[in-house]
Image (cartoon, rainbow, N blue to C red):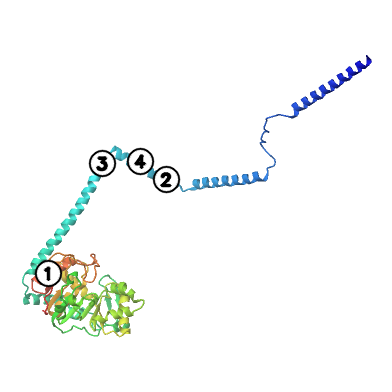
Amino acid sequence: MRGQLLKLHFSLIITLLCLGGLLTSLIWYNYNVEPHRLSPRKKNPSQLSEPCKSCTKVMDKVAERKTEISEKQEDKPEKIREGNSKAAEQNSKISKNQEDNPQKVKEGNNKAVEQNSETSKKQEDSLQKVKEVIHKAVERYSQTWKKQEDNYQKFRSNLSSKCHGLEEAIITQNNKPVGSEIVYDGSKKTLKVTPELFSIFMKEHPFSNKTLDTCAVVGNGGILINSSCGEMIDSAQFVIRCNLPPLANGYEKHVGIKTDLVTANPSIFNYRFGALNGPRHPFVESLRRYGNSLLLIHAFSFSAYTAVSLRAIYTINDFESPIRPVFLNPEYLKSLLLFWRAQGLRENRLSTGLITTSLALELCNNVHLYGFWPFSNHPHDLHNLTNHYYDDMQAKKQFHAMPAEFDLLMRLHSQGILRLHLGDCPTGGK
């Protein structure tokens, strides 16, 4: 009996111990284990792992870049923003005006069409006027030409008394002694004649007390192309050419090769030969075609051209070229301008062609002009012509009134004072 009680007590103790242990385990589990819960993120970690530190640096750089871009945008000039605003306002106004005033838009378009139409009409009218002028010139030219000796002598006497070309056209040691002044005809500037300058002047005028029978003054007009006038030109006793024109390479048949006087505008020295500041041999070679002719240089029209003109003469002397350089007298040009103004010409400067024609009218009994045609259409069939027979460089209209000069020459032709040759020349001399 006693043994059974002991066993019962022992079993009860064991059971209580098991229940106590189970209860203890349950309590510990509830306080220390939270199944299916993520640990919360710490808002302000005191330490970061190395990968997170790198991420932070990258993010910092991105933030800095955004800040820089924002600052640059804020630092843009106010004018740009104002310009953009104004442009937007103008576009808005234009659009609004076009929407509000469709009639004005139509009127503007109509005006543009009218202006284009007027321009076309003016061009047509201008072309028609040129054709009319050419037609009148051809009518006057087609009349049989005969020299009118009385008209010629009267005109020549008047020209000589006013201009004295045979004594004054060229600067010499007689008309410009040391100490005298040269007054530029294109400006009010003056140049004192020094002993050095005096030494390169021609001693005497080459045309003093001289009268020639026949002179040919050859312009450079495109009308000389395929004209076959070379033989007639070369048959003249004295041939005058303008501005160092080419004579070879097939031009001989149409313009001839004989030259007794050739002019040179100093601008040619500048654009053809580099103002003679570099190699000078090409310039000297270009003069060979003119032999021992007179080279008439416009050195004293503008002071800017004097130095290069003197270099041209020094070059000619250094290379012992046979050509004979002389200076055109600006006083002669002034008197010549007054003379032609009295004849009805209205311009500030005379062309080289009219200057040389004036000299020829004093020098020669019979004056023939070739290559003088200021229009871009041929007088016979109106086909297109270049400005020069060797190029199409246009004349400076602010200096020369070519059609007006031509009208004067045509008048002298009609009066039998000189003879213009337009178009093709018959072969076999004069």
89 shown above or below 199: above
Q: Nearer the viewer, residue 71 or 337?
A: 71
User: Which of the 4 quarters of the picture holds residue 226?
Assistant: bottom left
Q: Earlier in the sequence, mark 1 or mark 4?
A: 4
The quarter of the picture where the N terminus appears is: top right
Q: Earlier in the sequence, mark 2 or mark 1?
A: 2
Three-letter amino acid code at disc 1?
A: Met
Determine if residue 343 is in view.
Answer: no
The residue tagged 1 is 410
The alpha-carbon separation of the residues under discs 3 and 4 comes to: 17 Å
Three-letter amino acid code at disc 4?
A: Ser
In the drawing, what numbered circle is on residue 361?
none
Q: Residue furthest top?
A: 1
Q: Earlier in the sequence, mark 4 or mark 2?
A: 2
- Closer to the camera: disc 1 or disc 4? 4
Q: Are marks 3 and 4 in contact (CB under 8 Å)?
A: no
Q: Earlier in the sequence, mark 1 or mark 3?
A: 3
Q: Nearer the viewer, residue 239 or 78?
A: 239
Three-letter amino acid code at disc 2?
A: Glu
The alpha-carbon separation of the residues under discs 2 and 1 comes to: 65 Å
The alpha-carbon separation of the residues under discs 1 and 3 comes to: 53 Å
The residue tagged 4 is 92
Q: Earlier in the sequence, mark 3 or mark 2?
A: 2
The residue tagged 2 is 82
In the drawing, what numbered circle is on residue 104?
3
Point out residue 327 in the picture as x, y percentages from the top left corner. Answer: 25, 79
